[in-house]
């Protein structure tokens, strides 16, 4: 990266939030550092889901206010490096995303791979660690919730769910949240749909949630549901009380 190009790879909002949740948004931004150009992609591709999770940051910011929760989000496009993947994952820096080839990611050497990890992936996860460490030192409990969005059509297949909850071995927050969503809304709710941890999408929650004994939950909202600021706010207003009540049912641990 040129010496005159500076940006913050990660942002914390409401760092001292006293609520029981910590929010993360891995794919909040489609920003690409100037030195990478557009990775050979069109402006349309840079706005599409392959570059980021449209609407996810807006929902996360609203939830941060409603839950008095700290929020950590990445400021770099997942096409530069995907913060929700292990550093050894084949799609950490994708050469192809959905049906689109990424020319600027082809044939990267080990040095460039490490450069990108240092650019965005490491700062993002180090920031999460520091925040959780600080909360634990104060005796604060932390349920870790990540917020994502997904495309209505994936490789030609239509997704019927407006929202899906993704969870791994610890379903203590997910199960009551699933039931509350079904009871309180008319949405078709995905249970480990449209993804599950088996798809390799659970890295952040496994690393900072399950591995540390924190209650984890991944929220996936179909991005046509959160295409405007008003829609983002409405979804946050729906989800905030559900998360609170689900955590209470989970024992508030």
Image (cartoon, rainbow, N blue to C red):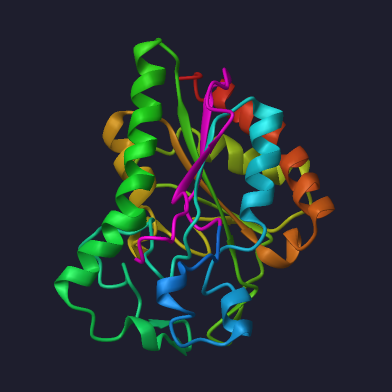
178 w.r.t. 214: above or below = below
Of residue 55 and residue 44, the one placed in the foreground of this image is 44
Residue 130 screen position, x and y as percent: 35, 29
Q: Is residue 5 magenta?
A: yes
Quick check: can you spot residue 209?
no
Residue 231 in the image: above or below residue 245: below
**Front residue of this view, candidates 171 and 28:** 28
Kindly identify the residue that appears in the image at 39 percent across and 69 percent down: 80
Residue sitting at x 25%, y 72%: 90
Query: Which residue is rendered at x = 63% and y = 44% of the image?
Result: 60
Residue 129 in picture, x, y percent from top left: 33, 33
Tell me which secondary structure the magenta stretch mostly adopts: loop
Label tally: 0
Residue 206 falls within the magenta-colored stretch = no
Measured as percent of width and height from the top left, residue 170 is found at 38, 37
Q: Is residue 239 left or right of residue 83?
A: right
Please provide the residue range marked out in magenta: 1-28
Q: Residue at x 34, y 66 (%)?
A: 1
Looking at the image, the residue that sits furthest to the top is 139
The C terminus, quarter of image: top left
- Left or right of 100 in this view: 53: right
- Residue closest to the eye, 51 or 33: 33
Which residue reaches farthest right?
Answer: 230
Vertically, is 207 above or below 220?
A: above
Q: Is residue 142 visible?
A: yes
Q: In x, y percent, where is residue 234?
A: 80, 46
Extreme-front residue of the structure: 4
């Amino acid at each position: 990266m040129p010496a005159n190009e500076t940006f913050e790879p990660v942002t914390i909002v409401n760092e001292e939030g006293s609520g029981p949740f910590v929010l993360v948004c891995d794919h909040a931004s489609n920003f690409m550092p100037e030195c990478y150009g557009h990775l050979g992609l069109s402006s349309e591709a840079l706005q599409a889901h392959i570059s980021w999770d449209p609407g996810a940051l807006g929902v996360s910011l609203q939830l941060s206010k409603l839950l008095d929760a700290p929020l950590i989000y990445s400021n770099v496009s997942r096409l530069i490096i995907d913060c929700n993947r292990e550093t050894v994952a084949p799609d950490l820096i994708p050469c192809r995303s959905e049906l689109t080839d990424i020319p600027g990611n082809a044939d990267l050497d080990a040095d460039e791979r490490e450069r990108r990890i240092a650019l965005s992936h490491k700062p993002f996860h180090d920031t999460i660690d520091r925040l959780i460490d600080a909360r634990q030192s104060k005796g604060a409990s932390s349920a870790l919730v990540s917020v994502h969005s997904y495309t209505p059509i994936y490789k030609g297949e239509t997704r019927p769910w407006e929202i899906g909850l993704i969870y791994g071995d610890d379903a203590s927050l997910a199960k009551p949240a699933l039931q509350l969503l079904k009871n309180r809304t008319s949405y078709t709710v995905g249970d480990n749909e449209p993804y599950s941890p088996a798809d390799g999408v659970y890295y952040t929650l496994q690393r900072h949630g399950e591995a540390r004994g924190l209650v984890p939950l991944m929220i996936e909202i179909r991005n046509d549901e959160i295409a405007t600021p008003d829609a983002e706010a409405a979804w946050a207003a729906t989800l905030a009380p559900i998360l609170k009540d689900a955590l209470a049912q989970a024992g508030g641990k």
